[in-house]
Amino acid sequence: MARIAILLDDRCHPKECQWECQAYCPPVRMGQECILEGPLGKPIISETLCIGCGICVHKCPFDAIKILNTPEADPNEIVHRYGYNGFRLYRMPIPPPQGISGLLGPNGTGKTTALRLLAGREVPNLGDYAAGGSWPKVLEHYRGTALRAHFERVAKGELRTVLKPQYVDRLSEEPISVREYVERGGPRAAAVLEEVGLTARADRKLSDLSGGELQLVAIAGTIAADADLYLIDEPSSYLDIVHRLQVARVLRRLGETKSVLVVEHDLGLLDYLADQAHLLYGEPAAFGVITHPIPMRTAINTYLTGYLKDENVRFRPEAVRFVSHPPKPTTRLNVLVTFPALEKEYPAFHLGVGVGSVAKGETVGIVGPNATGKTTFVKMLAGVEAPTVGGVAPGVTVSYKPQYLKATQAASLRERAGALSGDPSFDGKLFERELVPGLHLDGILDVALTDLSGGELQRAAVALALARPATLYLLDEPSAYLDADERMSMARLIRRQVERQAVSALVVDHDVYLLDLACDALMVFRADAPDGSRGRGDGPFPMREGMNRLLSTVGITFRRDAETLRPRINREGSALDREQRAAGEYYYEAP
Ligand code: ADP
Ligand code: ADP
């Protein structure tokens, strides 16, 4: 076993604590220099002197320390290490000269780091963080391997790489137009704008675009470049199902002649997009190991099973299970919430939603393209926006998790929950016993909300929303910023809570696997005017009908994987695709 001691730099506030890590450390108390003050005024934890007792982990008021006892990883396989108590990455993906490879693994296990190293944005230090990386050392280390050939070309500046960044919202700060941005990317700008459907919006300023539009711009700017290797970090964020598939097709076309490496958490999309994937396992923020490439279908099935046979690694205690048939339509006798026909009139947008009802214990997915009014509908039910026509029935208590989250308080989740305890509108017991473990929040209870990553904040916000006793839970895009594993545990948790408490939930989301696992019924939104000035929402429909309504408008069919029963997107025009379209069964087998 190897001992790994990690200090999470951004969470460590050595001026605001009593150095509890050092004060309570048994070896320190015995006079050993196990925890010292480093040159930057933060603790340095010796991995050789540490006895693995975990006292510092519990005493740290900011949850800034991780101590792990893990099976010995081969130090020769370290590619990069961020500092003494920093994250370490083992092994690298090797992109083939053509085709699309995926990187699939939990947040914080080194996917972005791997992309940056492959692109030569940072020189791998092979674990020697003190000396830093140098190309001669890297080339010597990888002598005789395919990676050497790759790094040699990078070092000589002969491999042209381009990287689509993960955080596209930052683009909105650039004072330029869509066309200017994409032209800066490379010579294929005009063709690429057309491919991703941005031609009509080419003269808009980046600052005026929605998240989904910025994502398309970022992708367009990346593939406009004339490069050898395209590194694409999370292309699906902010995109609806239609745009996810459109982007997948564009990237597949690129992969016919170029080498493309994609990080993606939407499993349905990754499955369709890539030919093979490298899985990552490890401990978030501590270490990550990248596996050899696995053919796409097997890669996702392995991921869902939770066990990597080749390396004898279990990354989840149990397998994720799908069922191939639709859930039984709920009986309408059990109706818990009914809403009347609603309309909302904005200066440039009109939304109409038909009468609907949600049954006890039912989770309803809300699906459809962006800008068709899904968020507006949820806000009307939440009482955040007043409907122009129709009123929401009184007597329904709602709990709402908005789409965009922004932490404004320096308070931690524990402090937040503590302040709410005793409040009848907060179920502290449920929070502590079910939601904290279910959403894996134990390790971040003491971190200031403002210090949480996007995925951590999302899980915290969902936990706080579900801890509020209500009849109707409204969750707007709970999968945003979550990795695939977190999405699936989120789906199961929502479903379980709703069933157990005999309440209802409406969940806006674009991830088909999350919807499949969580939902009993679907509301379907669509554009109701060619210029996007009107939106229309209907339902809830039983899953089969809802999926058929959604997928028939976008022309996508799914089949089921024989082994895991997970949904898989059919190749356009394949025999199955044609057969299912003809039968009008886009998602489930004919009854
Ligand atoms: P992923 O893309 O899988 O979410 P990243 O490669 O972004 O993972 O990061 C892995 C870990 O490496 C993070 O948890 C973070 O703690 C650490 N890390 C990333 N970049 C740096 C950096 N520049 N300096 C120090 N640590 C870093
Ligand atoms: P979705 O959730 O389906 O992406 P939204 O409900 O967010 O759609 O938005 C639907 C349309 O309503 C968009 O065209 C948006 O610009 C418009 N809209 C949303 N909120 C407002 C507002 N407060 N004022 C004016 N227009 C708005």
Image (spheres, rainbow, N blue to C red):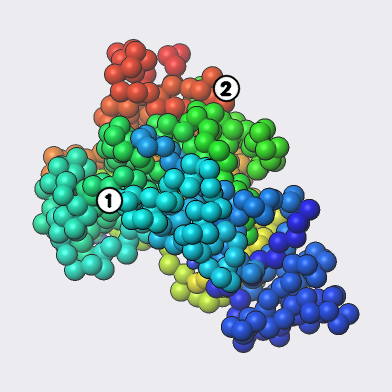
Q: Quadrant of residue 79?
A: bottom right
Give the vertical position of 93 relative to 58 (above or below): above
* SS at circle 2: loop
Q: In front: 92, or 515? A: 92
Crowd around label 1: few <14 · some 14–19 · many ≥20 (10 Å):
many
The residue at the far right in this view is: 30
Which three-letter amino acid code belongs to the residue tagged 1? Answer: Thr
* Element type at mark 1: helix
Corner quadrant of residue 443: bottom right
Residue 171 percent coordinates (x, y): 28, 62
Give the CA separation, mark 2 to mark 1.
36 Å
Residue depth check, mark 2 versus mark 1: number of the one nearer the observer: 1
Quarter containing ligand 2? Answer: bottom left
Residue 452 screen position, x and y as percent: 52, 66
> Which residue is located at x 54 percent, y 28 percent?
298
On the question of residue 520 being in view, the answer is no
Residue at (43% x, 41% y) in the render: 95
87 left or right of 556 in image? right
Q: Quadrant of the C terminus?
A: top left
Residue, x 68% and y 50% (percent of image)?
74
The response on whether ligand 1 sits within 8 Å of label 2 is: no
Question: Does residue 510 show up?
Answer: yes
Which kind of residue does numbered mark 2 sit on? Glu
| Label 2 environment density (alpha carbons within 10 Å; few <14, some 14–19, many ≥20) | few
From the image, tell me which residue sits under label 1.
Answer: 222
* Res. 563 mark: 2
